[in-house]
Image (cartoon, helix red, strand yellow):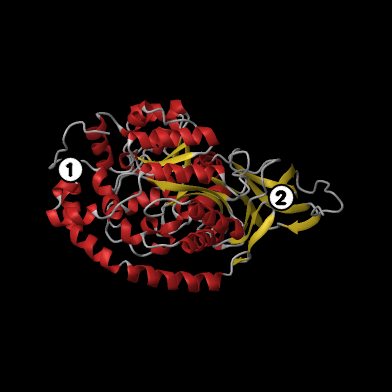
Amino acid sequence: MTARPLAIRGGLVAFPSQGEIRPADLLVADGRIAAVLPPGASMPEDAERLDASDRLVMPGLVNAHTHSHLAIAKGISRSWTLELHLHNGPWTGGGQNLADRYLLAQASAAEMLLKGCTACYDLVLELPSPSPEGMFATASGYLDAGMRAVVAPMLADRTFWQAIPGLREALPAEAQAQVDAIRLGGHDSALEACQRILAEWPHDRTRVRPGLAPTIPLHCSDDFWTGCRALADHYGAPMHTHLAESKIQALAGQARYGMSLTAHLDRLGILAPDVTAAHGIWLDAADLEILAKRGCSVAHNPSSNFRLGSGVADVPAMVSAGIRVGLGSDACSCSDHQNLFEVMRLACYLPRTASFDPEDWLTPRDIFEMATCGSARALGLQEVTGDIRPGLAADLVFLDLGSVNFTPLNDAIHQLVFAEEGRSITRVMVGGRTVVQDGRLLAIDYPALRARLNERAREIFTANASRKATLSAIEPFVSHFCVGLAQGRIELAGSLPS
């Protein structure tokens, strides 16, 4: 039996691709936007009515970069750079089981949906290797929550201590033995698992689709990279990586490859329109030219970039180069939240620190487009979600214009980006189905989720206490090496085997 169409009347409607908000009525049929109509236009007589008076109706925000496996790690990270965050990863994100994949996807979805995000790109780490069962369970967590996602296993065949030239050798002998004991699965077994993930994917790919995430260029051998590229090409899967996120990565890339990380990936034939590069803080003009030429997207993550002290990405230069840019929250362990409203505001503020000329600044309209259309392009879902136009899914967020954030209502887009934090949300729809109503999740039993998440956090971090103690004792040596490298007091050897 076909559901009745839905007539959404009386609202202010946000159109990010057009950079405007205006009064309009929407007709939703079969989970999609069937028509955008002038206020008061004729609607089918059998349509269900939804009064959107005093509401701002916007497309759901799209999170271009997150990690559900770290939903358990809120409040864990200390004054850590990216490198210290990676060093501590085996205890902050390790020790999880298959059931945790579903639980943590649900936890991520709960926060994002409550804060107006209806789709995400989730890079999921399983140690020591990815598994089809783990990725399928993650996808089920999002599906059951009513959220869209691209689920991509994080892939590496080098550990953090192996990836940075000279780092392992700079550790005391006992510490070297301790980090050597932390192993990853071989790249052959990882690629075999990925082949099964892509070939046997059991879910509706318009709702939750698989991808591949070779995590950081330095953490993956060249053979691993080309193997991932071949799988992506064969199965039509998108790829996602962390590119030039820190100065350490940029310097280590030059030392290992004799060229930038971007140039190295391009030399391997990796870069293409299906590739999303997260962060991109330490990219130069030549790198931007390559990414633009190859049609890649960049997932800009200002919250974690600031939290980890990694730097400020030159997003205006990316836009000028013709690169597609989306916005991401990154993980709860290095961003502390999954709130794209907070990300939008910070993304709009940051470029203003680099230029005194307002002509160089990104506008709220630019940023709103990035958080919706731009991020949808990064997920490869631009023909599914990210905007309001006929044919796209009815992934919609309703905001109360009576809230203090919109009072007085002077410029809705400016106030959406600069003043809103998600508290004005009254309803969230995905595919025309309401999944959040008046601050309540309709597809997730939040009290049960909260209880289980707290329980698993206690269990996991108790079990990981020994590894935490081991890595904490080594942390000063890692910090000394990386800070010295960033400050120019330590030099890396010349080109090393890739």
Residue 329 is situated, as x and y percent measured from the top left of the image, at 44, 52
Instruction: Please determine whether, in this image, residue 427 is positioned above or below residue 239.
Output: below
Snapshot quadrant of residue 385: top right
Q: Which residue has dot 1 on it?
A: 166
Q: Toward the viewer: 234 or 394?
A: 234
Answer left or right for 92 relative to 420.
Answer: left
Say which element carries label 2: loop
Q: Toward the viewer: 217 or 30?
A: 217
> In what quadrant of the picture does the C terminus appear?
top left
Q: Which residue has dot 2 on it?
A: 31
Q: Residue at x 40, y 69 (%)?
A: 457
Q: Toward the viewer: 27 or 449?
A: 449
Answer left or right for 487 relative to 33.
Answer: left
Indicate the amino acid at tag 1.
Gly
Say which element carries label 1: loop
Residue 206 is situated, as x and y percent measured from the top left of the image, at 62, 45
Instruction: Please determine whether, in this image, residue 6 is positioned above or below residue 237.
Output: below
Residue 96 is situated, as x and y percent measured from the top left of the image, at 41, 62
